[in-house]
Amino acid sequence: MALNPKRVAFFDVDNTILKGSSLFFLGRGMYQRGFFTKREISAFVLANLRYRLTGKENKEEIDRIQKAACEFIGGHNVKELETIGLEIYDEYVSAKLWQGTIEIANEHLRAGEEVWLVTATPIDMANLIAKRLGLTGALGTIAEVKDGKYTGKMIGKLLHGKEKALAIQALAAEKNIDLSNSFAYSDSHHDLPLLEAVGHPRAINPDALLQIRAIRDNWPIHEFRRARALSRFLGPILSRLAALATLFSPRSGKRKNSD
C-alpha cells in the first residue's frame, strides 16, 4: 500500500537562510587559511559579482560562474575542506543567519514536514549547513571527486534557475513528495522556476522583480531586513505627515488664524 505523499518545505540559502553568500564565506575562510592567493580567488568572486550586478540569465554568464565555481575548489582534499567547512560555519555563517527564516523552517519541522535546502552552493557545504540547522537535507551543486580530491569539474549542471525546479521534481519522484502541497522560499527572481514548481511559493527578503511577482500573485512575503521593513511600515505614515506639514506650513497660505 502506497504511503500518502509528503508535504515538504524547500529553502534557498543565500540571502534567504543566510545574510550574504555561503560561497563567499567559504572562500574567505579558505583564503585566510592560505588556500588561495588574491589572484586565484578573484575569478570566482568577479564571476559572481558580475552576475549579481547584471542579473543576466544567459548561457555564457552561467557557464562562466560554473567554471569559476569548479576551479574554486579544484585540487583540494575533500576531508580537509569538510573540516574547514565546519570551522567556517562557526566563524562566519552561524552569525549571519536570518533568524526569522530559521523560525519558519523550524515551524515546518515541528509540523512533521521535511525541510530541504536547494542551492547552487557545493553540496558538501549545503549538507553541512542543513546538518547544523537540524534540517532534513540539501540539494546542491555536485563537484567531481577523484582519489579524495576535487577535480575542478562538475557533475551535472550548476543548481541554479530551472535546475532547482528539476532537482526538487526528481527528489519528489524519489521520496513520494507532493509538490502541489509543498512550500518553497526564496529571495530572488532567479528562483521563480523553483517557486512555481510548488503549490505554496513564498518570498523572503525579495528582490524587486520577485516582490512584484509576489504582490501580483498574492504570494506571502516575509521581510526580515529591518530598514526595509521599517520603511514599508513608516513610509505611508511619513508621506502623510509630509503632506500635512506642507498643507499647514506658513508658506502654503492655507492655514488661517482663527483670532
Image: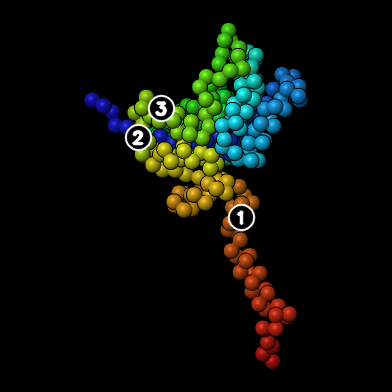
Q: Secondary structure at mark 1?
A: helix
Query: Which residue type does callout 2 highlight?
Result: Asp
Residue 196 locus on image (x, y percent): 43, 41
Separation of residues labelled 1 and 2 (CA atoms): 37 Å
Label 1 or label 2, whichever comes before in sequence order: 2
Residue 46 locus on image (x, y percent): 69, 32
Q: Nearer the viewer, mark 1 or mark 2?
A: 2
Q: Where is mark 1, residue-wise?
A: 230
Using the image as rendered, state which of residue 90 and residue 70 is in the foreground: 70
Q: Are marks 2 and 3 in contact (CB under 8 Å)?
A: no
Residue at figure coordinates x 64%, y 51% from the top left: 227
Q: Are marks 3 and 1 in contact (CB under 8 Å)?
A: no
Query: Which residue type does callout 1 highlight?
Result: Leu
Quarter of the figure that contains the C terminus? bottom right
Residue at figure coordinates x 53%, y 32% from the top left: 160
Residue 187 locus on image (x, y percent): 55, 42
Quarter of the figure that contains the N terminus? top left
Disc 3 crowd rating (10 Å Cα; few below 14, some 14-19, many 20+) is some
User: Residue extending furthest right?
Assistant: 38
Q: Where is mark 3, residue-wise?
A: 171
Residue at figure coordinates x 65%, y 14% from the top left: 75
